[in-house]
Amino acid sequence: MAGDFQTPLDGREAAGREHFALLVARARGGDAVAFERIMLETERKVVAVAWRMLGNREDARDAAQEVFLRVYKYLDRYRPEQDFNGWLYRITINVCRDAARKRGSRPDGAQFAPRPGEDERAAPEAASTDMNAEENAIRAQQRALMMSALRTLPEKERAALVLRDLEGLTTEEVARVLRSRPVTVRSQISSARAKLKIHCERLLRHKGERRV
Amino acid sequence: MFKTMKCTRVEKFLPLYIANDLTGRRRTRAVENHLAACERCRRAADEYRASREMFRMAAPVPDFDGAFYEEIRNSVLARVACDRTLAPPGGFSRLFDMRLAYAASLALLFIVAALSLHSYTRRAPEEGAAQKMIANANRERPATPATVKTPPAIRPNDDDRPTPRPAVEPARETTGTGRRASKSSPQVPRENIERAVNKATTGAPDERRAPLHDRRNPPAPIVVATAQANVVEMAAAVGGETYAQPEVSRIEIQTSDPNIRIIWLSPVAEDTARPLK
């Protein structure tokens, strides 16, 4: 595990890695401020992945809490030469898988349906701008469309797509996070993108027919 | 080779090609060449790009308020402070790494195995010597069931069957512990027991010529004989029969049920050693 996420670094990545290694070392020594600092710097990333994986605010909050508890519990397993973000992504994905498994026997699909008002809470900036109501409605529709498409994907494909297309990791980094092979990740990503395109086309066609 | 790539094959590569995830320079160039010549596949590639872009744009990072994140942090910090089941970072948990735990377990297993082997190898010669003593005693036992008798482990209490009587009538116990027992059950005389034990332990060729109280060189280990004397007394006390063995004590106890007889075999302990009188 210590050998994971050991890729050649540029200056910024190396500085970031040293920064987190220092914070982790302080947190290991019982420094609560350092641990809180780690949470402050990574909480948005953790919540974003959890929200995209689980599909609602409450589950994302619970998952984020569990992620940071696990981070604290396993701080001594983190090695300074590791990429802290990759380590954090792995914990987050594992927590989301456990949460989906706990929630029911069907982790994918219908039970991930959005709850009332969730999309509005997820993007309050859209409501606060001066855009007209039609643009807001179109954007909300697009968001709902894509999130529903994401929810129809199998868990592994969803994780690969979220990490690759939304978090911006390379396929090799995604493979390390998911403990898989790059060729497997490419296959999952390819399948997910194809399904996403088909889903979008179907929904757009359906909406076009309804408008006509 | 890839210049003649068909549309069906190119369509499989398009989801990866549009985000530069396709591996292999030749394959990528073949797809590019095909797209340059095929309008239909080019349109499909544009659709893939559009749906991906739409997905990225429509799935922004959820902008939850500060209270949401503060709630997460406070909850985690409270749990960390209160819950002792969470391993504190560093300290013992760092020392007790999983690899260290495996190594310690293996070492413990090895030590236990070594101790077991050591105790077994120490006990084996003693057991061998004891078995040899029993064999010698059985070989030198006289034909008449006078002194040592080896009964079956459990035998029914059949009164009709004639009970073998010892050739030498056992001397009546003077301890007076069991009147009924001394009358009803034949007992092995102490002299015979001592003689058998003496033969088994010292290997004396003809011990009848040299009684124990007259011997110039008394046998060194008297442990077994003393234990046998105790066995005789105990058997007399409980009203059972005693069959002398050189180094194994045997007590038979007749229960109230005539079909059940309890037989107790035990090795002679050293702490019961008592010099013979």
Image (cartoon, helix red, strand yellow):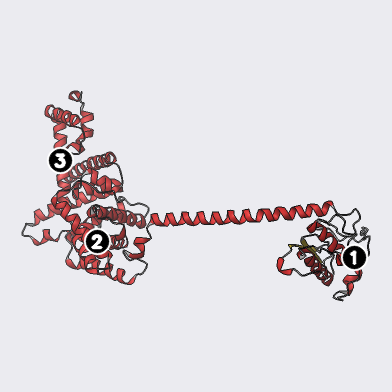
What SS does tag 2 mark? Answer: helix
Quarter of the figure with the C terminus of chain A: top left
The x, y position of residue B135, in whole percent, is 79, 52
Q: Chain of mark 1?
A: B
Q: Which residue is mark 3?
A: B49
Q: Is residue B227 left or right of residue B79?
A: right
What SS does tag 3 mark? Answer: helix
The x, y position of residue B248, in whole percent, is 76, 60
Amino acid type, label 2: Val
Q: Is residue A90 above or below residue A69?
A: above
Q: Tell if the residue under mark 3 belongs to the same chain as the one under mark 2.
A: no
Q: Nearer the viewer, residue B41 or B87?
A: B87
| Residue B201 appears in the figure | yes
Please tell me which residue is depicted at 29% across the width and 41% down the height of the picture. Answer: A181
Mark 3 vs 2: CB contact within 8 A? no
Q: Is residue B227 above or below residue B11?
A: below
The x, y position of residue B79, in whole percent, is 31, 69
Which of the labelled discs sits on residue A24, or is there none? 2
Amino acid type, label 1: Pro
Q: Chain of mark 3?
A: B
The x, y position of residue A73, in whole percent, is 32, 62
Q: CA distance from mark 3 to mark 1?
A: 108 Å
Frontmost of labels 1 and 2 is 1
Please tell me which residue is depicted at 72% across the width and 65% down the height of the picture. Answer: B269
| Residue A158 appears in the figure | no
Amino acid type, label 3: Arg
- Mark with earlier residue (3, 1): 3
Q: Which residue is mark 1?
A: B186
Tag 2: Cα neighbours inside 10 Å, few (<14), some, or many (≥20)?
many
Determine which quarter of the picture holds residue B181: bottom right
Q: Nearer the viewer, residue B253 or B272?
A: B272
Determine which quarter of the picture holds residue B177: bottom right
